[in-house]
Image: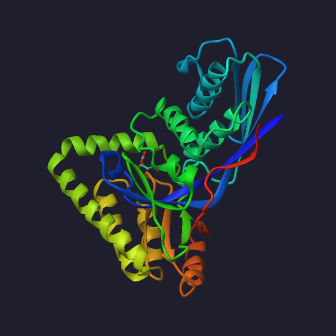
Amino acid sequence: MKSIASAPGKVILFGEHFVVYGVKAILCAIDKRITATTQFLDEPKIRIKSELGNAEMDVDTPLDLNSISTRFMKPFFYIVKETLREFNEKKGVEVVLKSDIPAGIGLGSSSAACVAVTASVVGLFDKKSKEQVLKKSIESERIIFEDVSGADSSVSTFGGLMAYDKNGFEKIYSKNNLSLIIANSNQVHDTREIVLKVREFKNKNEKMFADMCKQEKELVREALLRLKENDLNKLGSLISENQKLLKKINVSTDKLDFLIKEASKTSYGAKITGAGGGGCVISLVDESNATTTLENLKKISDCFIAKIDFDGLRYLQSK
Ligand code: MEV
């Protein structure tokens, strides 16, 4: 029997980085997914296969995270090991990942993979609630990235548009199924490294950082109101204000600044999404300016229009 689950990527509209320090973020799941297919093996091995590489270990070998050379694979081994232990199962397991979310560019591929793998592996035994899948999936991410806020996994699990802080999330019901153009800088980043750099910045500039958290909180408060009113002009200028704060904490790059400058000519507003230091820029558009913005950005980047995914985690086949 195969157990199959899929989970979407995400963009952060407001509040990346500041969310790690307790500020609310606004984010939405997007219509790009990662699918995990899991089955038992006859041999006592745990095998992970993905477009980014393959890895395996023996079922009986204790999980030594230092011995798994590929960092992004560690949470998947953790999920399989923990699940086999929970269900007292000795058989081997293979997990195959297929993704249409490009990795390492701020679109939440790692979190979506952890959510899909958790649901798919657990699905061999049982069907857990989305809350249970989310809990285990955040736990697995924390073994390689302690500071992770849980925002990305939450939106990947539940889908839609949401406000998130460390106390949990709240779905946002907007009149608008937002259209966003996502432009890839083709500069790959490591979220954990950038989050650590921001922590260093915060430690050196405590007062300035506290002020910036206050400003971000205010931007998010206003953005929540504008989302309800569907005021794209105002939302766009709040997005651009948010970008100024991201630039101040040094997570922008020349390439990202250039993409944002070009996108801002025709869209309602543009900013980095996710950790920055590379990755993607999002621009808020509607039918009046989507084509011109897309055509212009296409000349200088790989880009596409994303819509909100309202489903979040999908079980495609399970016990
Ligand atoms: C990464 O997509 C978002 C960050 O705020 C980190 C996190 O929330 O865990 C940079």
Q: x, y (%) of residue 109?
A: 58, 48
Which is more toward the observer, 133 or 138?
133
Q: Residue furthest left?
A: 207
| Vertical order, 204 against 216 (above or below) | above
Residue 67 higher or lower than 166, as above or below? above
Residue 228 in picture, x, y percent from top left: 42, 75
Residue 293 placement (x, y as % from top left): 54, 79
Q: How is the image coloured?
A: rainbow
> At x 44% / y 81%, what residue is drawn?
265
Determine whether 106 is above or below 62 in the image. below
Across and down, in percent, residue 243 comes to: 35, 65
Task: Judge by depth and name the residue closer to the eye, 312 or 292.
Answer: 312
- Where is residue 67, by image quadrant? top right
- Location of the N terminus by quadrant is top right
Q: Is residue 21 left or right of residue 305?
A: left
**The quarter of the displayed image where residue 94 is located:** top right
Q: How many marks?
A: 0
The residue drawn where x is 61% and y is 54% is 312
Question: Is residue 32 left or right of 249 when viewed as pictured?
Answer: right
Please identify the residue farthest to the bottom as the structure is shown: 288
Instruction: Please say if 47 is above or below 35.
Output: above
Q: Image quadrant of residue 319?
A: top right
